[in-house]
């Protein structure tokens, strides 16, 4: 039998910034990935909620959001490719939603590329609905779909 890797979900700290930026770059191309300075700032920002998944001392997942009064924007969501489709994304995303709810946010939204059907289907499972399309949102001229869910 194969070894089961234990994943620990915990708040992101400033010490995680470099590792989370490396994960972001691995999951997204250079134009979409954020640098470690951004994650360092997000870890210190009281309006942000960032959660990491750690396996054997290595960051393998991250999801983050920023709360603006009663609305929350999901800013990033990345899972190491070797850990995808194993339930980690579902667990860490559910933990983020619970944290957002505990902060009394009533609305949560995100942007996603129309070409990212896997992500759209994932968000649909959590009750998100497409409510708008923003033309030329991404640097290459690709539109963004705005997905929304009430909490």
Image (spheres, rainbow, N blue to C red):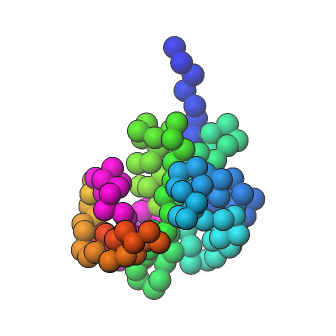
In the picture provided, is 47 more to the left or to the right than 43? left
Return the x and y of residue 18 as percentages of the image width and height.
72, 57
- The quadrant the C terminus occupies is bottom left
Instruction: Please tell me in which quadrant of the rendered image residue 49 appears.
Output: bottom right
Q: Nearer the viewer, residue 55 or 111?
A: 111
Up-down: is 85 above or below 100? above
Q: Residue furthest front?
A: 140
4 versus 28 height, above or below: above
Residue furthest to the bottom: 69
Q: Quadrant of residue 126?
A: bottom left
Residue at the limit of the structure toward the top, as seen here: 1
Where residue 37 appears, as percent x and y from the top left, is: 70, 69
Say whether residue 29 is visible.
Answer: yes
Q: Is residue 15 magenta?
A: no
Residue under the point 57% across and 31% down: 5
The residue that appears at 35% across and 55% down in the rendered structure is: 116
User: Does the magenta run of residues contain 116?
Assistant: yes
Q: Is residue 91 left or right of residue 52?
A: left
> What residue is at 51 percent from the left and 48 percent from the top?
79
Q: Which residues are magenta?
A: 97-122
The image position of residue 45, as x and y in percent, is 64, 76
Q: Which residue is rendered at x = 31% and y = 62% of the image?
A: 114
């Amino acid at each position: 039998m194969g070894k089961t890797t234990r994943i620990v979900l915990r708040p992101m700290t400033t010490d995680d910034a470099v590792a989370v930026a490396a994960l972001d770059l691995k999951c997204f191309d250079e134009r979409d990935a954020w640098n470690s300075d951004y994650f360092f700032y997000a870890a210190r920002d009281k309006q942000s909620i960032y959660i990491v998944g750690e396996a054997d001392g290595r960051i393998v997942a991250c999801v983050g959001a920023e709360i603006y009064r009663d609305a929350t924007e999901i800013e990033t969501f990345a899972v190491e490719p070797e850990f995808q489709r194993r339930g980690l994304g579902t667990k860490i995303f559910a933990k983020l939603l619970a944290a957002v709810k505990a902060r009394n946010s009533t609305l949560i939204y995100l942007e996603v590329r129309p070409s990212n059907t896997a992500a759209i289907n994932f968000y649909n499972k959590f009750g998100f609905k497409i409510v708008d399309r923003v033309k030329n949102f991404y640097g290459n001229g690709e539109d963004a779909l705005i997905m929304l869910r009430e909490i």
